[in-house]
Amino acid sequence: MSRDAVNAICRVLPGAEWSDPWGGGHDAWKVGGKLFAVIGAAGAAVAVKCASVDEAEHLMDLFGWRKAAYFHRSWVEMPLGTEADLLRHRLEASHATILAGLPRKVRTALEAGRDAAAPPGPGQA
């Protein structure tokens, strides 16, 4: 799966917002101001949040993925070459994990689609 395909998946998730907070070509996806997916400037992998450290360790053991550099131990790094359905599932699960941790008022507004217009993602005007 390509960087563009990952961005296309993230772009349509409820409340998802794109940014490049560190400059240099990162694609950082947030919901409610919290990161749920990051593609580094090199673009070889996407970092996603897991529900727990145990889940992250299980995925690393199962698929040989690495812990995402510079992130908490509950984040894993998935190569962009990961099978498309699995990659989509993990992106959606990461988004849901972050969404579930947001305050109820924010979560309700995002789930209902009442959030402010998100800035366009990469390649959009």
Image (cartoon, rainbow, N blue to C red):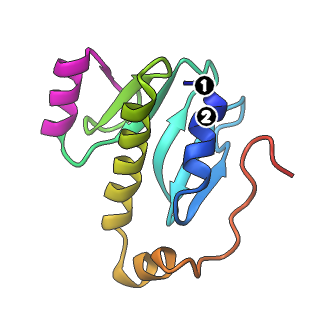
Total residue callouts: 2
Residue 82 against residue 36 in the figure, above or below: above
Q: Amino acid at mark 2?
A: Ala
Magenta stretch mostly in which secondary structure?
A: helix
Residue 78 x %, y %: 40, 25
Q: Amino acid at mark 1?
A: Ser
Q: Nearer the viewer, residue 81 or 119?
A: 81
Establish if 10 lies above or below 86.
Answer: below
Q: Position of residue 73 (x, y in %)?
A: 25, 35
The residue drawn where x is 28% and y is 43% is 50
Is there a contact, CB below 8 Å, between mark 1 and mark 2?
yes
Numbered badge on residue 2: 1
Badge 1 marks a residue whose secondary structure is loop
The residue lying furthest to the front in this view is 85
- Write the start and end of the magenta stretch as one range: 54-67
For residue 74, what is the image quadrant? top left
The structure residue drawn at horizontal position 18% and vertical position 20%, both measured from the top left corner, is: 62
Residue 16, compared with residue 50, is above or below; it is below
Determine the image quadrant of residue 76.
Answer: top left
For the point 48% across and 42% down, which residue is it? 37
Residue farthest bottom in this picture: 105
Displayed quadrant of residue 116: bottom right
Q: Which residue is mark 2?
A: 5
Work out whether residue 101 can be spotted.
no
